[in-house]
């Protein structure tokens, strides 16, 4: 494994915080716009083939939708850079008891199913050890552990609400097939505007939760970075190895 070099976290943290703040503002605007568009939808029933064209102007009003996608991508990239740098600092300082390498601190975000809990564990390790002197042998329990859990719970909720949004659509679709077709007819899949309105509410709620999650993420990034960068060079350095003329090897 190549040697890690300790770097300040605040430069990348400021970029992450700025992007998260922008993402929160855009998510709030999208939630409001979706609810406004929902109220303007005319009632009635429409064929399933029209679902996409009817949904697009409601859920992704231009140009806000395009900007939101770009900001979300940039936020994800810079977050991973920041987290890799944070874990690299812990390894460079020789903090004892580390379980996750900088590479896996990033990699766990991309592993199916494991991404629901492993990124929280890697961030928790960074939270526990940021600002901890390498020579310290005492376990560190910094304050705010409950808020760290709350951040992850809100983040997961913002991801999972999008799946729940499809419930009203699926229910309405199944109902239309079972009630509107006779044995001699081919199934006719239709949706009602009511189902689409319920879907829009779910998506708007998801954006609101994402706004709250961005606020918690800002707190996590800023707190970790401030604690880590506050370490003096003497505190950041690990314990000095024993003199070679003493006849024993340093512990591994």
Image: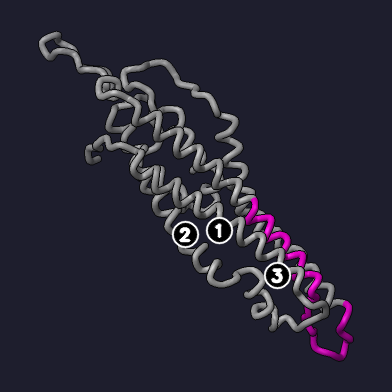
Q: Please tell me how crowded label 2 is: few (under 14), some (14-19), or many (20+) other residues with Cα within 10 Å.
A: some
Closer to viewer: mark 3 or mark 2: 3
Can you tell which quarter of the image residue 33 is in? bottom right
Asked if residue 181 is among those painted magenta in the image, a careful observer would answer yes
Contact flag, marks 1 and 2 (Cβ < 8 Å): yes
Which residue is drawn at the image coordinates 34% and 21% (left, top)? 133
- Nearest the viewer among 33 and 143 is 33
User: Which quadrant, please, contains the C terminus?
Assistant: top left
Q: Which SS type dominates the magenta stretch?
A: helix
| Quarter of the figure with residue 28 | bottom right
Above or below residue 43? Residue 102 is above
Chain-order first, disc 3 or disc 2: 3
Which image quadrant for residue 77? bottom left
Residue for point 51% across, 68% down: 66
Which mark's residue is nearer the viewer, 1 or 2? 1
Q: Which mark is residue 26?
A: 1
Q: Residue furthest bottom?
A: 184
Q: How far across and down, in percent of the image, does residue 197 sit?
A: 76, 68
Q: How far across and how far down the image is residue 132, in percent?
A: 38, 23
* Cα–Cα span, label 1 and label 2: 9 Å
């Amino acid at each position: 494994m190549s040697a890690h070099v300790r770097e300040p976290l605040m430069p990348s943290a400021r970029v992450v915080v700025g992007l998260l703040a922008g993402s929160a503002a855009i998510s709030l605007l999208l939630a409001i716009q979706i609810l406004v568009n929902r109220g303007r939808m005319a009632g009635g029933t429409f064929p399933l083939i029209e679902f996409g064209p009817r949904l697009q102007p409601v859920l992704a009003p231009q140009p806000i939708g395009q900007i939101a996608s770009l900001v979300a991508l940039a936020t994800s990239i810079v977050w991973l850079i920041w987290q890799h740098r944070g874990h690299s600092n812990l390894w460079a300082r020789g903090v004892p008891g580390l379980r996750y390498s900088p590479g896996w601190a990033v990699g766990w975000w991309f592993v199916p199913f494991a991404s629901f809990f492993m990124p929280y564990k890697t961030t928790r390790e960074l939270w526990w050890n940021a600002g901890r002197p390498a020579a310290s042998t005492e376990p560190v329990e910094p304050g705010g552990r409950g808020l760290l859990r709350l951040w992850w719970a809100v983040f997961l909720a913002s991801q999972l609400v999008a799946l729940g949004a499809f419930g009203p659509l699926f229910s309405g679709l199944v109902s239309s097939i079972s009630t509107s077709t006779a044995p001699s007819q081919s199934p006719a899949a239709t949706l009602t505007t009511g189902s689409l309105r319920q879907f829009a509410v779910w998506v708007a709620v998801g954006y609101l939760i994402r706004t709250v999650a961005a606020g918690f993420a800002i707190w996590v990034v800023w707190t970790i970075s401030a604690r880590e960068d506050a370490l003096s060079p003497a505190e950041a350095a690990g314990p000095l190895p024993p003199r070679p003329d003493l006849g024993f090897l340093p512990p591994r």
